[in-house]
Amino acid sequence: MHLLAYVDPGTGALIWQSIVGACVGVVFYFKTTRKWLCGLLARLLGRRPKTKTAVSAVGGKVEGDRC
């Protein structure tokens, strides 16, 4: 017995869009959760979180907000 499967282009595009959307959503979720957690830890430890507006003197690069 042969089983033939067919996915039309509309359904295939919907599947790919769902996969890409889920991946972007996961990245956004973890990014915002990390930012929230870093801010919480900074408040608990009495430190001010770094901001992206701090520009270093060498090269004028903007420093990131890593904890």
Image (cartoon, helix red, strand yellow):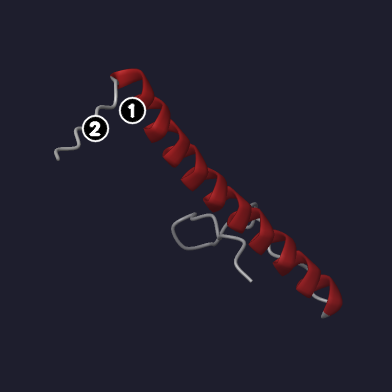
**Pick the front one: 7 or 4:** 4
- The residue that label 2 is drawn on is 5
Q: Residue at x 47, y 47 (%)?
A: 23
Residue 50 x, y percent position in the rendering: 68, 64
Residue extending farthest left: 2
Q: Residue at x 14, y 38 (%)?
A: 2
- The residue that label 1 is drawn on is 12
In space, the residues marked 2 and 1 are separated at their CA atoms by 12 Å
If the image is split into quadrants, where does the C terminus sit? Answer: bottom right
Q: Name the N-terminal-most of marks 2 and 1.
A: 2
Does 55 appear above or below 13? Answer: below
Does 27 appear above or below 63? Answer: above
Name the amino acid, label 1: Gly
| Quarter location, residue 32 | bottom right
| Quarter location, residue 34 | bottom right
Where disc 1 sits, the SS reads helix
**Pick the front one: 23 or 15:** 15
Front label number (2 vs 1): 2
Residue 12 x, y percent position in the rendering: 33, 28
> In screen coordinates, is 7 left or right of 46?
left
**Pick the front one: 40 or 60:** 40
Where disc 2 sits, the SS reads loop
**Pick the front one: 3 or 13:** 3
